[in-house]
Amino acid sequence: MATTTWTAETTPDKVWDVLSDGWLFPLWVVGACRIRGVDDAWPAPGARLHHSVGLWPVLLDDHTEVISCQPGDSLELQARAWPLGEARVLLRLRPTDGGTEIELQEDVTDGPGTALPKPLRAGALHWRNKETLRRLAMLAEGRS
């Protein structure tokens, strides 16, 4: 799995507030462009958010499902964007002096991306996820 970390200058509760609001997903996830619906139970295990990825007018409609959730601590997701594939995503929050370390682990689990060697996948995911975590931190810090 590709692992990327970022430190937000706010509390874990503020970061969790963003993660637990599925409607905010396209504001921080690079590649997600709109939300079509969020299950009422989000972010409980089994809950889904229904999103579109890509750039207009070429959009793919799919969903992301919660695998596990420890409120305020971690969120594990199965993200789908077929025909591109699927990825397992794990977000962990750790309090630090004056902030929150956000760790994002991700790897492709199904689809064409699995054909890429792991070092190439990890490099591409790290680049994308660094921006994703930067956006997540900015949203959370704005709520402080």
Image: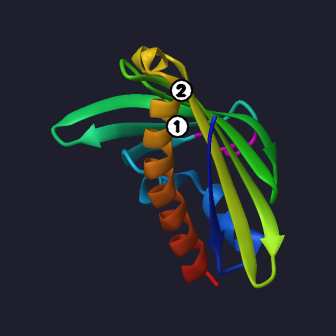
Q: Quadrant of the N terminus?
A: top right
Which structural element holds mark 2? helix
Q: Quadrant of residue 45?
A: top right
Image mark for residue 98 = none
Image mark for residue 122 = 1
Q: In the rendered image, which residue does mark 2 sit on?
A: 118
Q: In this view, does 97 lie above or below 103?
A: below
- Report the side of 134 relative to 46 (left or right): left
The amino acid on which the numbered mark 1 sits, given as a three-letter code, is Ala
Nearer to me, 112 or 26:
112
Q: Residue at coordinates 35% horizontally, 38% vertically from top-left? A: 53
Q: How many labels does the image show?
A: 2
Question: Residue 49, image x and y in percent?
Answer: 54, 39
Q: Quadrant of residue 107?
A: top right
Q: In this view, does 90 lie above or below 60?
A: below
Q: CB of mark 2 within 8 Å of CB of mark 1?
A: yes
- Report the side of 6 relative to 128 (left or right): right
The amino acid on which the numbered mark 2 sits, given as a three-letter code, is Lys
